[in-house]
Image (cartoon, rainbow, N blue to C red):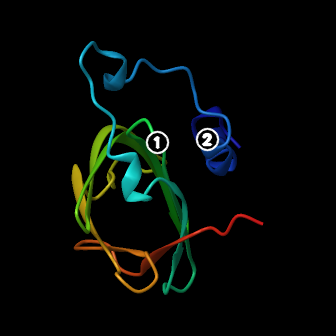
Amino acid sequence: MSKRFAWTAAAAMALITPPQIAWAQDAPGAVPPDAEAGVAGHYYLTGMMETGSELLLQPDGVFKWYLVVGALDLLAEGRWTAKGEVVTLIVEQQQTNNPETPVPFEQLVLTRDAEDGALVPGEPLRGRYVKARAD
């Protein structure tokens, strides 16, 4: 396996050990999302066969996302905001193992399900991101 694709095996680890990146929240006057909304957390994609995806919404307004489907691996990092039942992801960095298939969004709007708190993406994604339970 080439070094170019070596990051693929570590995609899930990016959620646990984030790289040292200077994020926009480090800028003076940056305001993190409303912590009272209870949106921050670790989410897993459900409802899509043969697809793996996780979304990490950190309390400081940083998100990390990955999607693996077949031989395609996509990673994105950036900023997130929450307003009411709408969560918006804005991509600042992305990686893919296929340069012809970039992350399919620069901004993604997810709607929070009032019943279970799952985040439901709009086009071009499908399924539901369900928050991991704290055991």
Toward the right, the furthest residue is 135
Note whether residue 95 is visible.
no
Q: Position of residue 84 (x, y in %)?
A: 22, 64
Where is residue 88, by image quadrant?
A: bottom left
Observer-nearest residue: 52 or 118?
A: 118
Q: Residues within 10 Å of mark 1 (few under 14, many from 20)?
A: some
In which quadrant is the C terminus drawn?
bottom right
Q: Earlier in the sequence, mark 2 or mark 1?
A: 2
- The residue that disc 1 covers is 59
Q: Position of residue 58 (x, y in %)?
A: 48, 43
- The residue that disc 2 covers is 14
Q: Is residue 133 above or below residue 66?
A: below
Observer-nearest residue: 16 or 36?
A: 36
Q: Please give left or right for residue 61 compared with residue 27 in the image.
A: right
Q: Position of residue 121 (x, y in %)?
A: 31, 72
Camera-side mark, 2 or 1: 1
Residue at the image position 42 percent from the left and 59 percent from the top: 39
Residue at the image position 33 percent from the left and 46 percent from the top: 34
- The local secondary structure at tag 1 comes to loop
Residue at the image position 64 percent from the left and 33 percent from the top: 3
In which quadrant is the N terminus drawn?
top right
Toward the front, the furthest residue is 36
Disc ID at residue 88: none
Residue at the image position 67 percent from the left and 35 percent from the top: 17
Question: Tag 1: residue type?
Answer: Pro
